[in-house]
Image: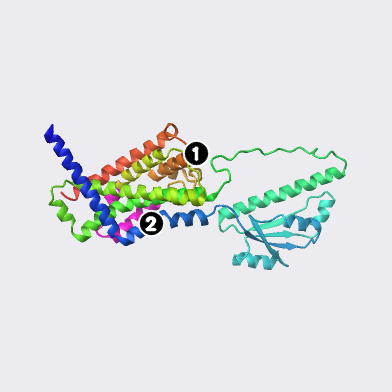
Amino acid sequence: MKKETSAAFIWLQRHAAMIRKELVQLLRDKLLVFFLIYAFSMDIILAGGSISLDLKNASLWVRDLDHKVESRELMQRFQPPAFRLKGGVDNAHEIQTMMDKGEAMATLDFGPGFSENIHKGRQATTLMQVDATNSVLGTLAASHASHIVFQFSLEKAQERLAKAGAASGGTPSIRDAHRVWFNPNQRDSWFMSITELLTIITVFAVMLPATAMVREKERGTVEQLLVSPLSTWQIMLPKILSMTFVILLGTAVSLFCVIRPIFHTPIRGSLPLFFGVTALYVFTTSGLSLFISTLARNLAQVGLLTILVLAPMLFLSGAWTPPEAMPGWLRFAMVVSPLHHYIDTGFGILLKGAGMEILWDSVGMIALIGGIMLSVGAWRFRRQFH
């Protein structure tokens, strides 16, 4: 019993020494430390503060051949934050030129007789042209414009009915009563800052352990480790544990020093659960990093292979493109992307306040996919030394 206790103590002592060595080596790499600080602070500030998925200040030019109250009233309803009325143009050729040069996001064209048709109860037409080079912004601009024109048309119809003697408010209507959950003010900064944090965690989970291992190859110290009493597992595990600790530390800094104080993003769920799932995700995703370290011979190759791995993971995460908008075979591929399940879990805990009773399936998929990746990575890592 005493012998077994002594062996366990030596095992722990060796791991503690190796973890301390990995942290010291990381701190000596000034460029990597700077990258870590930047990624968990400034990068999240930039992502949360500058990236918006809404339509804002879309430049709008108007050709008004009607020159009456009704046309001017309608054009004045295209106001910020969605639209910014830039001015008027005289002919269709000028409109086309501005669309071609990208100077106009949308144009509004009132033909002669627009107001007269309204007064006489006939259908009045206005032409709106939208630059849909960016299909998302184009769709938003068309949707906002349709809502504005519909509201204007409804008010004019009610005025006409009132003048005809109908009771005010007598036209049938449907009141849209809706409730926005989890992000009531629909702030992009809440979504973008958390998405960027989860992405940065994935980047470092894939990159840091591989960097630590390949650094040993470049300096030739891996041979010294191999002739030491350490087993392959005792070489590999401290690298994963130390980098997991660094990533969790960076995550805590981002949450408490950037996301909450700057963007006022609420944390509605359990923080121990979030950090526990993050530790599980980082630890298991490190299998990819071990696999990369067996292929790369220098840090440049680690960087290239990391990009090669991360690109499909980000594309299949569901953060930028909803699964419903993807082809069927890509939706199936999303199931095997650990980042997809981690993003579901992260938003579920932080914004929705969900617990394990709701998120158990996503956490289970993280453990299953990550366990397979860690097993393959560890197998490749041990095999290269035999």
Q: Nearer the viewer, mark 2 or mark 1?
A: 2
Query: Under tag 2, what secondary structure?
Result: helix
Q: Position of residue 66 (x, y in %)?
A: 79, 60
Neighbour tally class for label 1: few under 14, some 14-19, many 20 plus, Cα within 10 Å: some
Q: Which residues are magenta?
A: 287-312
Q: Which residue is mark 2?
A: 37
Q: Which residue carries the number 1 mark?
A: 352
Give neighbour class at mark 2: few <14, some 14-19, many 20+ (Cα, 10 Å). Answer: some
Q: Return the residue nearer the eye: 38 or 50.
A: 38
Q: Is residue 289 magenta?
A: yes
Q: Amino acid at mark 2?
A: Ile
Up the image or down, 306 lies above or below 277; here it is below
Report whether residue 380 is seen. Answer: no
**Residue placed most toward the observer, 165 or 363:** 363
Left or right relative to 320: residue 132: right
Position in image of residue 367 (x %, y %): 34, 38
Cβ–Cβ under 8 Å for marks 2 and 1: no
Quadrant of the rendered structure where residue 96 is? bottom right
The main secondary structure of the magenta stretch is: helix
Q: Identify which residue is drawn at 77% across, 47% down.
A: 155
Left or right relative to 171: residue 98: left
Local SS, label 1: loop
Q: Locate residue 179, reporting x and y percent.
A: 60, 38
- Give the mark nearest the N terminus, 2 or 1: 2
At label 1, the amino acid type is Lys
